[in-house]
Structure formats: structure tokens, C-alpha cells
Image (cartoon, rainbow, N blue to C red):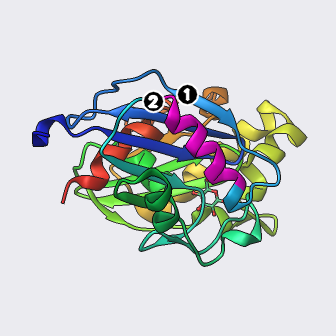
Amino acid sequence: MAENNIRTLSVDIGGSGIKVIVLDTAGNPQTERARLETPQPATPEAVIKAIAQLAAGQGEFERVSVGFPGVVRSSVTETAVNLTADWIGFDLGTALQKLLGQPVRVVNDADMQGLGAISRQGVELVITLGTGFGSALFVDGKLVPNLEMGHHEFRKGETYEQQLGRAALEDVGEKKWNSRLEKAIGSLQRLFNYDRLYIGGGEAKKVTLNLPPNIKIIPNVSGLLGGIALWRD
Ligand code: BGC
């Protein structure tokens, strides 16, 4: 197959949903995005089964990109706070490669989301608001992998994820959650002095703040579109 026809199955593993799409070499979607609820408990076996089921409905592809909600090193998952402890030390890349018969690359979900959204200029920070709180940092398009801001202390003895994850949103409501987010943005601005901040994830649509021009809300599909960048060597 010609290099420009290589199709990439892009997979976004989330705490509440698993999503897939097939991208062409330019990163354009070739299929309809498909989604399944994340199985509970979200063990490696159950999640892989869901990915196989989704992949079967996507036609053909020659390689696979995966965004995973935890620290990932050489396609081994090292943390998975919102899934199960079975993921610690699990070689997701190899397991999926065996199952799908194609080369697989795995990165943190917020890293993949950022790759689908950034301008590749200057200091760019990405946060994702979903089940968990994801974060990714880029300098001129170069990723600083596995930035885990979510589990860093934010305020009142709680982490960014405890204050701004989905459980907190459901607990305190949108108004208070937005005001917490405003404080978080201020704190991240002072820490990173970013040129641009992107806010993604399933709950980004609930952001009602008036944002300055260097802060953008990005669609959740960026999490899948970033899959193409994993193969840009
Ligand atoms: C995880 C991150 C992930 C984020 C969003 C956090 O709990 O530690 O790795 O990016 O959730 O899924």
C-alpha cells in the first residue's frame, strides 16, 4: 500500500467511553466515529474486548494509535486511576498488536488529544475535563510526555482531579465547577506562562467562562484526531 494510503485506527480509552475512528495519512476521518461505554470493571481484558468489537466495525486499517488515561511508557501502562489496578505494568501495545495484527502505538490520552489540537508554536498547555483531569505540555510541538497535573495539589488540600473531575462536577454543580476552573486556569497561567491553553474532554462543553483569545475549547474528537501524530517520526 502506498505510504499516503496508510489508514490509522485511532482509539481513545476514557473512563466512561471508548471511541474509535479511522484516519487517512493526512489525519482526515475515513469512518464514522464509534463509541462503546467503558466496561465496568474496566480491566485490560474487558477494555481490549471492547476495542476489538469497535475495530471490527471500522473496516481495514494498517496501524493503530491509542490514547490511554494514565501514564504510558513504551506502550506499557503504568497508572490507571480511573480504570482498575490490573493496568499497572500491562503491555497494552503488545496485547493489541497481537489481537489486531497491526503495529500499535500507545500514549497518554491528554497527550494524544493535544497532538490533535496544538499549533506547534511556543508553549502550549492542554487540559482535559472528563472522568479525570488530563494535562499535556508542548514546546514548539514537542511533547513533554505524561504531565500528570491532575494528581497534583490544587486547592483546599485537593488535587485538580478531585476538584474538577466529573465526580466533583456532579457533586458541586456547573456554577461552582466553573469558578473552580477559573482559579485553576489562573494557577496554570502563573506556573507555565503558556502561549496557548486548550481545554478539551467530554465536559469542556460545560465551560461557561469568558475566555481570552489564547484559551480555546477544543472538541472531544481531537482525542482521536491526534492519533495520526504518533506516526510522525
Ligand atoms: C490520569 C491521566 C489522564 C486523565 C484524563 C487522570 O486520572 O492520571 O493520565 O490523562 O485522568 O483521562
What residue sits 73% from the left and 49% below the top? 165
Mark 2 neighbour class, 10 Å CA radius: few under 14, some 14 to 19, many 20 or more: some
| Left or right relative to 181: residue 232 | left
**Residue 44, position as x, y percentages in the image:** 67, 61
Residue flagged by tag 1: what amino acid is it? Ala
Q: Nearer the viewer, residue 219 or 57?
A: 57
Which image quadrant for residue 81? bottom right
Q: Secondary structure at mark 1?
A: strand
Q: Looking at the image, which residue sits at the far bottom?
A: 89
| Left or right relative to 22: residue 80 | right
Image: 173 above or below 127: above
**Residue 34: assigned label:** 1
Magenta segment: 46-57
Q: Which residue is mark 2?
A: 58
Mark 1 neighbour class, 10 Å CA radius: few under 14, some 14 to 19, many 20 or more: some
Q: Is residue 81 visible?
A: yes
**Residue 66, position as x, y percentages in the image:** 46, 52
Say how many tags the image has: 2
Q: Nearer the viewer, residue 134 or 47?
A: 47
Q: Quadrant of the N terminus?
A: top left
What residue sits 80% from the left and 38% below the top? 176
Which quadrant of the picture is home to ligand 1?
bottom right
Q: Nearer the viewer, residue 168 or 196?
A: 168
Q: Is residue 115 visible?
A: no
Q: Earlier in the sequence, mark 1 or mark 2?
A: 1
Q: Are marks 1 and 2 in contact (CB under 8 Å)?
A: yes
Disc 1 to disc 2, how far (Cα)? 8 Å
Q: Secondary structure at mark 2?
A: loop
Image: 75 above or below 184: below
127 magenta-colored: no
Q: Nearer the viewer, mark 1 or mark 2?
A: 2
**Residue 190, position as x, y percentages in the image:** 49, 61
